[in-house]
Image (cartoon, rainbow, N blue to C red):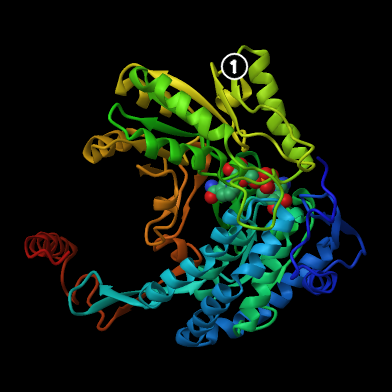
Amino acid sequence: MTLTPLELTRPASVTDAFLAQLVARVPGSSGATWKLTEVYTGDVLVELPQSAPEDIERAFAVAREAQLKWAATPLKDRLAVFKRAHALFVDRARAIADLIQVESGKNRRMAIEETCDPPMVMSHYLKRAARLLAPTRRGGPVPLLTTSTEIRQPKGVVGIIAPWNFPFATGVSDAVPALMAGNAVVLKPDNKTALSPLYGVRLLEEAGLPEGLFQVVCGEGPDVGPTLIDHADYVMFTGSTATGRVIGERAGRNLIGCCLELGGKNPMILLEDASLEEAVQGAVFGAFGNTGQICMHIERIYLPESRYEEFKTAFVAAASALDFRAAYDFGPDMGSLVSVDHMRRVKSHVDDAVAKGATVLCGGKPRPDLGPAFFEPTVLEGVTTDMLCGVTETFGPVVALHRYRTVDEAVALANNTDYGLNASVWSTDVAAARAVAARIESGNVNVNDILATAYAAKGTPSGGVKNSGVGARHGDQGLLKYTDVKNLAVLKKQVMGPRPGQGYEKYVESMLSGLKLMRKLRIR
Ligand code: NAD
């Protein structure tokens, strides 16, 4: 079967005129463009302008000017924009999902879920921002006579570099707390998936975000990245570990802060007493949700010897029964990979594993009959650490089953990785699962779930350890990282140092006994 436009009708909202309007805000003085394609068909959707260094410099200059006014706007007025935006984003969820689908090729169920992320982030920080940004007055070194106040100030202009796998969520959600805190934003989305974040910016402006405050520049990473980082006051990056190192090095040289949300090689551990039905359902989502292109998804499943065959049979049956194809309705369980290049990378991991002795239990092949970048849901066994997919992130619908004999061995295998982004532990005994979770080296661990419980808990920081990242999004630090602290200290009367006529010995004696007294009274 090959796809024809007759069989696959592009969503009605995705018109040429609409796309042209969306990309018109991207500066591209050189006239260079990038052909942004519909993933399911490979058809060109729009010519995306590519931003030259001068365009990026100008975008920062405009953003910087807008930021001064925005930072001086009362917080309640800034937050009012996001109250309106929340409603607007929910109302337009279907149109947003249309754009996410055409540019990423993911299935509609994932696309609509993705649209919910920015409203959830807005909702959380609408409750929390006023408290986080309020000055906090603390005592100073001398009781009653001194105060020290922690004042939160916006960094200035935040550069955000976003990947293609959740382009709308990573492009918009990470900007929300930065903007609430009084910053401007310059976003560089991935070329392949610039449309949905561009629409997000437009919706924020419809909700009242001042024009100029949120700039979008486009281009290949190595072309745009250096100028962007050199002009930013802080960088928020989501993407691969390899690129994260490049971004972190440059930010370090410039002495600016950065948050790096990187890749994973995430394990799932079943304990002896886990529910088969729930674990299989979880594993299907964990391995094949978003076509395996979720940073927190599962690529390694560890099973006790006693449950291996039972799980393998049920899981392979479930994977083989998945409905994966190109469609703009809620039918398919799984969509396409994002591009032919990425499909080839996923295929190379499977081919390498097979060449080195792994067994394909189901899937394992590209499906050009369904669309240019489709790849079958694939389950492997016999994967070892000398295989590419045994150690590095595949980022596709490919998962390996492994046996373990003891829980200690399962924990050791799960931790035997350079990554530490997410893990999932399954058991009907929650206390036992929590005990295992505590031993996993990972920024997120979900008990009886794959990732949503951790990721949707917007009040708790979510980030990676080891090679999976630096810093976190969500939680208090997800907003505070976009601020600098000013310590405003006041001494009401000069009492520091020896009194007139007091010898230094006497002064030191009184100072030391004062220290002891304050400790005793628990003042300092
Ligand atoms: P990538 O690192 O190739 O690209 C990410 C972004 O960085 C893109 O916009 C790209 O154009 C840009 N970029 C590339 N090289 C650059 C450079 N030298 N300077 C500046 N920018 C540059 O990653 P990808 O393939 O787009 O995304 C998939 C990866 O992202 C996976 O590893 C996945 O695990 C990770 N990811 C992590 C999270 C998280 O929260 N931890 C979330 C989503 C995706």
Q: Nearer the viewer, residue 70 or 220?
A: 220
Please indicate, yes or no, whether residue 146 appears anywhere in the rendered image: yes
Badge 1 element:
strand
Percent coordinates x, y for residue 309 in the rendering: 42, 19
Residue 315, above or below 37: above
Residue reaching furthest to the top? 357
Q: Quadrant of the N terminus?
A: top right
Q: Check the picture and name the quadrant holding the C terminus.
A: bottom left
Mark 1 packing: few (<14 Cα in 10 Å), some, or many (20+)?
Answer: some
326 to the left or right of 505: right
Q: Quadrant of residue 344?
A: top right
Residue 13, image quadrant: bottom right
Amino acid beneath label 1 = Thr
In the rendered image, residue 444, in percent from the top left (x then y), is placed at 41, 45
Nearer to me, 280 or 267: 280
Q: State whether residue 258 is above or below residue 368.
A: below
Task: Examine the rendered structure and indicate whether residue 360 appears above or below residue 284.
Answer: above
- Is residue 244 shown to the viewer in this render? no
State the residue in front, 36 or 367: 367
Q: Is residue 415 left or right of residue 428?
A: right
Left or right: 242 as drawn, with respect to 451: right
Q: Position of residue 506 (x, y in %)?
A: 12, 64
Query: Is ligand 1 within 8 Å of the beta carbon of the residue shown at mark 1?
Result: no
The residue under the point 81% across, 75% down is 21
Seen in the image, is 232 located left or right of residue 55? left
Q: Residue at x 59, y 83 (%)?
A: 207
State the residue at coordinates (69%, 36%): 375
Instruction: Residue at 39%, 24% (x, y): give it.
Output: 303
Q: Position of residue 451 (x, y in %)?
A: 44, 47
Judging by the rendered image, the residue that carries numbered circle 1 is 359
Farthest residue to the right: give it: 31
The quadrant in which residue 393 appears is top right
